[in-house]
């Protein structure tokens, strides 16, 4: 059904006649004088054992007077509120009728607005798919922002916002790739496995911080290697102190066990000068005796 137009007169033809009610206490001056005299009579009353019975009567009379005053106030309050209660009920009934009409209209508007928003979302997705290759980013890397779906945003501004987002992600990826390359080379130069440090970069850690951490790890590695070397030298000296050589055998003097037996083997080694140099160093490093034949 087409929406009916409401005339201006129909819209503005609404007014309320309201006359403030005046509440008057009859003989108020006389009542206040009597009450004041009554209060003054008992003001400062001192309760004693001898007057206790009368004092209870006074209390009862005063409370009864207070109750009468409050009861009248409550009665008038209810009468005073009744016109407004009736007026409110009438207005609420009319508003309820309007709500019954507005509700389906509101639902219809919301439905079409959601449909339009979904169409804008599909347009944004299509634009991202088209632009992503130009910036060297994947569609999955782009998080759609709510502002891009705002119907007040022009197509030109929306395209620029998407482009700025893609450019930022592209620059971040380039920076990360360069940092990973730098960290890998730096870790290799320190004889440190780079995988863990690369992962820290991927988690957003700063490049200079990771380099400092690698320096610390390399220093710690040198300290541990030196400690291991000294421990090995110490152990070797302890072992040699408890060993003696008998012929080509080395025997533990504590247990009588043969801990090493030397044998001689004649080898002919063929290789480059560098190969022969490496072999000699290996023999030296492992304490293996050799001589040129």
Image (cartoon, rainbow, N blue to C red):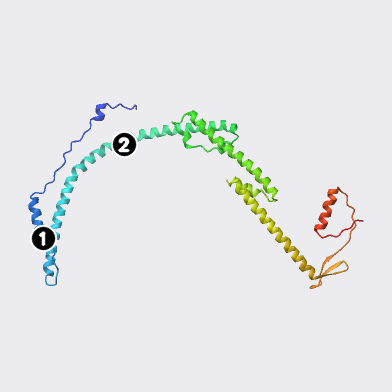
Residue 48 location (% of width, % of height): 14, 71
Name of the residue lying farthest toward the right: 293
Indicate the quadrant where residue 244 lies.
bottom right
Left or right: where does residue 226 sit relative to residue 213?
Answer: right
Left or right: where does residue 145 sit relative to residue 208?
Answer: left
Residue 254 location (% of width, % of height): 79, 73
The 10 Å Cα crowd at callout 1, few under 14, some 14 to 19, many 20 or more, is few
Left or right: where does residue 195 sit relative to residue 110?
Answer: right
Looking at marks 1 and 2 on the same chain, the residue that comes earlier in the sequence is marked by 1
- Secondary structure type for disc 2: helix
Q: CA distance from mark 1 to mark 2?
A: 60 Å
| Residue drawn at (77%, 65%) of the image | 236
Residue under pointer 1:
40
Indicate the quadrant where residue 237 lies.
bottom right
Residue under pointer 2:
99
Residue 161 location (% of width, % of height): 51, 33
The front one of 267 and 12 is 267
Residue 82 location (% of width, % of height): 19, 44
Quadrant of the drawing holding the N terminus: top left
The front one of 145 and 266 is 266
* Label 1 with label 2: CB-CB less than 8 Å: no
The front one of 253 and 58 is 253
| Residue drawn at (24%, 38%) of the image | 91
The 10 Å Cα crowd at callout 2, few under 14, some 14 to 19, many 20 or more, is few
- 1 vs 2, front mark: 1
Height in image: 198 above or below 47? Answer: above
């Amino acid at each position: 059904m087409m929406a009916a137009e409401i005339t201006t007169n129909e819209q503005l033809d609404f007014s309320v006649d309201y006359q403030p009610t005046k509440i008057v206490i009859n003989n108020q001056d006389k009542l206040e004088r009597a009450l004041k005299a009554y209060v003054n009579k008992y003001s400062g009353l001192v309760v004693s054992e001898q007057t206790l019975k009368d004092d209870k009567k006074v209390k009862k009379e005063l409370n009864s007077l207070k109750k009468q005053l409050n009861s009248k106030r409550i009665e008038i309050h209810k009468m005073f509120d009744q016109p407004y209660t009736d007026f409110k009920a009438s207005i609420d009934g009319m508003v309820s009728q309007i709500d019954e009409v507005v509700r389906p209209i509101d639902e219809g508007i919301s439905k079409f607005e959601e449909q339009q928003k979904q169409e804008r979302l599909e347009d944004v997705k299509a634009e991202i798919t088209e632009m992503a290759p130009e910036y060297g980013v994947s569609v999955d890397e782009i998080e759609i922002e709510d502002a891009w779906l705002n119907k007040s945003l022009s197509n030109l501004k929306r395209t620029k916002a998407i482009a700025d987002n893609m450019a930022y992600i592209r620059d971040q990826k380039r920076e990360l790739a360069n940092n990973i390359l730098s960290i890998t080379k730096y870790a290799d130069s320190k004889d440190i496995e780079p995988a863990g440090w690369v992962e820290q970069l991927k988690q957003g850690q700063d490049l200079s911080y990771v380099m400092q951490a690698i320096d610390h790890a390399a220093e710690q590695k040198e300290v541990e290697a030196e400690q291991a070397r000294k421990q090995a030298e110490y152990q070797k000296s302890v072992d040699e102190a408890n060993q003696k050589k008998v012929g080509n055998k080395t025997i533990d003097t504590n247990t009588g066990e043969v801990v090493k037996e030397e044998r001689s083997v004649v080898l002919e080694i063929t290789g480059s000068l560098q190969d022969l140099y490496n072999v000699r160093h290996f023999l030296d490093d492992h304490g293996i005796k050799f001589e040129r034949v």
